[in-house]
Every structure is written in structure tokens, then in C-alpha cells.
Image (tube, rainbow, N blue to C red):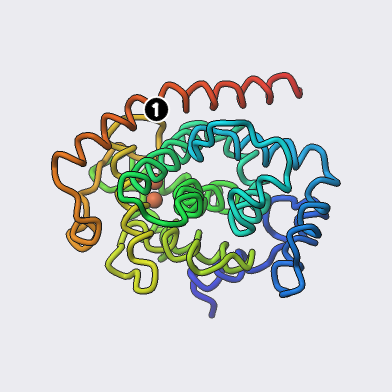
Amino acid sequence: MQTKREEINRMVQDVKSLPALPGIVVKLRALAESDAASLQIIARLISSDQILSAKVLKLVNSPFYGFPGRVSTVSNALILLGVNVVKALVLSSSIFDLMEENVVGLWEHSLGAGVAANIITKRLALPDGEEISTAALLHDIGKVIIKIKLKEEAERIRLKVDGGEVSIREAEKEVLDVDHAEIGGWLGKTWCLPEKLIEPIACHHDPVRSVTYADRTAVVHLSDILIKASGFGYSGDDLVPRIQEAAWKKLNLSDHVLREIVDEIEDKLIEVKNFSLEIQSSHEGKV
Ligand SMILES: [Fe+2]
Ligand SMILES: [Fe+2]
């Protein structure tokens, strides 16, 4: 007999069972598997869909990548952010749509984590900041899958969280035998995202499990905790976990630098809120 865990794994592996993917995303996923994918082919593919390009450009110009000027074309976005980031944004676009409309608190929590990751990577002068911010933006994507594909279980998880001291992650493990972080990692595999994006998503609550990309995972872990502590957005529970010691050591931050990072995040949150409100109003206009 299939366990709950296996059942969910199989469901996430089945692209057709996931939120409606426009044809272009399916093509992009196919391209992702071949080495022949060049920047131009990808740029042309995305640019042929106006709604999708507008969406990608909106995210690229959002506060968490922190580009001073406007990025106005998909080709520029690919050059500035890299193929992995743009691909991840395109592949997640249907799920972002669902989040923006139905789980605004989680959407804002995700945007906030993206901003926090951007600030931390800049402060630590880590390379590939845009990829790390993208992993932070996607870190809780597994929660959306649970919410839309496992409605009855999601309700049981919510009741457990509302009823006591249990975190959403613990409740997920009790009900599903797997948590949203691991489900997010499975989704990344289904989409053929690179391991450097998948590992920080899959291990963001348990960074000690991250072997190859421990730095990136530590940043996403800290970003999630800092944004929860700030009270911005809502990730599904009110508990702020402790920073895992291994991640703290890995980042090697002093209390003073951490304070500065927290202040910088606080300053940026108004911009993030405005960005989120702008997106909300665009949905209202759509009807
Ligand atoms: Fe999480
Ligand atoms: Fe989170």
C-alpha cells in the first residue's frame, strides 16, 4: 500500500496535476532539460507570452532584487538575473497567482523572505545573490501545494496549529508524514530546477541537512526566521523558530551586524507592502 508520503511525492511529480501551466511553461521545462537551451531561445519563448513576460518583469523589478534602474526586457532579465532565476520565476508563476489571490499572508511572507535574503547576501558579499533571493521567495511554495491539492489535510493541519503550541511544520508531519519544505524540494525536481535552488528550499527548516549549498540554505533559513520575527505577512503559524546553530556558525554574523540587517529589512518592508498591494489591485481590476 502506498504511504501518504509516497502518494504526495507521486502527485508532485505529475506535472499535469499541478496548477494549470500555460503551454509555454511546459516548453520551458522541456528546454530546461536540454543543454541546447540558449538565452535567446528562452527569451523569445517567454517574450511571446505578454502576460507571462509582464509578470516576470514585475518580479524582476520588485524590491527583493534591488536593481536601481528598470529592467525592461526579458533578455535583460536573463542577463542580469541568470537563466535559473528567470526559469524559476516563470515556472512558479501559476502558483504565485494562486498565492497572490488566496493566501496573501503567505505571499507577503515569501516576498519579505526574498528581500531579507537579498539584504543578507549583500551584507555578506555572497555571490549569486539573485539566486539566493529567489530560493527565499520560493521557500514555502510547498505550503501552496498542500493548500490547493490536499484541502482536507490542510484543514486538519490548520486546526492543529490553531489549537495549540504545534508549528505548521510539525502539524504537516503529523498529518502528511512530510513537511512543506520537502514537498517544495520535490516540486523543484519536477520542474528540473538546479540543486542550488532546490536544496535551500528543501532544507530551510533544517539547514544542517544541507550539504552542498549550506551557505545558501543558511541564508534562506535566517531570512525566514527574521521575517517571521518582524511580524510581516503570515506563514501559517505565529511561532518564531530559533536559528539553528550550524546555520548561525556558517553565516558567522556578529550581533551588531545582525541588528543592522534587521533594521535594513524593517526599512524595506514598506516597499514590499506597496509592491504586494499593487499586485492585489491588479488582480481586482482583472475580475
Ligand atoms: Fe517554511
Ligand atoms: Fe517561511
Figure check: 211 above or below 137: below
Residue 245: x and y, percent? 17, 59
Badge 1: how crowded within 10 Å, few (<14), some, or many (20+)? Answer: some
Identify the residue position indicated by label 1 in the image: 268
Position of residue 212 in the picture relative to residue 5 (left or right): left
In terms of image quadrants, where is residue 280? top right
Badge 1 amino acid: Lys
Q: Which image quarter is the N terminus in? A: bottom right
Q: Position of residue 68 (x, y in %)?
A: 53, 31
Residue furthest left as drawn:
255
Which residue is nearer to you in this view: 236 or 158?
Answer: 236
Mark 1 secondary-structure assignment: helix
Quarter of the figure that contains the C terminus: top right
Res. 235 image quadrant: top left
Residue at screen point 53% across, 36% down: 67
In the rendered image, residue 37, in percent from the top left (x then y), is placed at 75, 67
